[in-house]
Amino acid sequence: MKIRLDDLSSPAVAALLQEHLDDMHRTSPPESVHVLDLSKLKAPSIRFWCAWRDEQLLGCGALKLHSYHDAEIKSMRTARVFLRQGVAAKILQHIITYARETGLQSLYLETGTQDFFKPAHQLYLRHGFDFCGPFADYQADPNSCFMHLYLADLA
């Protein structure tokens, strides 16, 4: 598996992100869907990575910078055929390593509260994230949970 910065130009990446968007709308009320579409992921404040094995797209993940010290994990997605094979864990570890190396102090994320999101909760908890309150522009929402990782705790 190779994880590399991506420019979001691949049809495979667009299809995976559309699958992600569709699942978010299927599992959460519209006001609780905070997924970024392809155009918003191209913003200068976002770094987007994909995991590939040869020509097969395994998954993706992004980091949205909020300040010099804080960033948010976005668009974590594993292709269905590669679920439960460690793809998300490797992408997440890549993002955490990048964040530490660039001097970020905190990582945040928002995810859903429905059963569909329980594997994601477990992934983040295994990597040191804790539940927290809303951050950035998010508001308290029964369909959203928020998590935080203080990177200095990993030193």
Image (tube, rainbow, N blue to C red):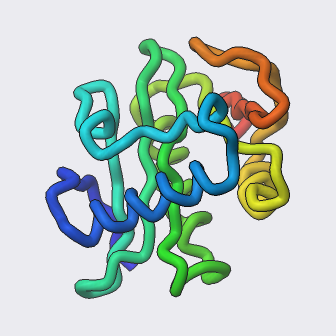
Q: Is residue 87 left or right of residue 133?
A: left
Between 18 and 42, which is closer to the camera in this rendering? 18
Residue 112 lies, with reference to residue 23, above or below; the image says: above
Q: What is the number of callouts on the image? A: 0
Q: Quadrant of the N terminus?
A: bottom left
Task: Please state if 84 lies on the left or on the right of 37 as rendered.
Answer: right
Image point (33%, 47%), residue name: 48
Q: Nearer the viewer, residue 139 or 77?
A: 139
Say left or right for 111 vs 141: left
Residue 151 visible in the picture: no
Pick the front one: 81 or 49: 81
In this picture, residue 106 sits left or right of residue 57: right
Task: Residue 19: give x, y in percent of width and height.
Answer: 45, 64
* Corner quadrant of residue 133: top right
Residue 26 occupies quadrant? bottom right
Say whether residue 124 is visible.
Answer: yes
Residue depicted at x 42% and y 76%: 58
* Residue under the image location 40 percent in, 31 percent down: 102
Horizontal and vertical percent position of residue 11: 20, 68
Residue 114 versus residue 138 in the image, above or below: below
Q: Position of residue 147 (x, y in %)?
A: 74, 34
Q: From the image, which quarter does the C terminus lie in?
A: top right
Vertical comparison of 131 with 77: above or below: above
Residue at 29% across, 46% down: 38
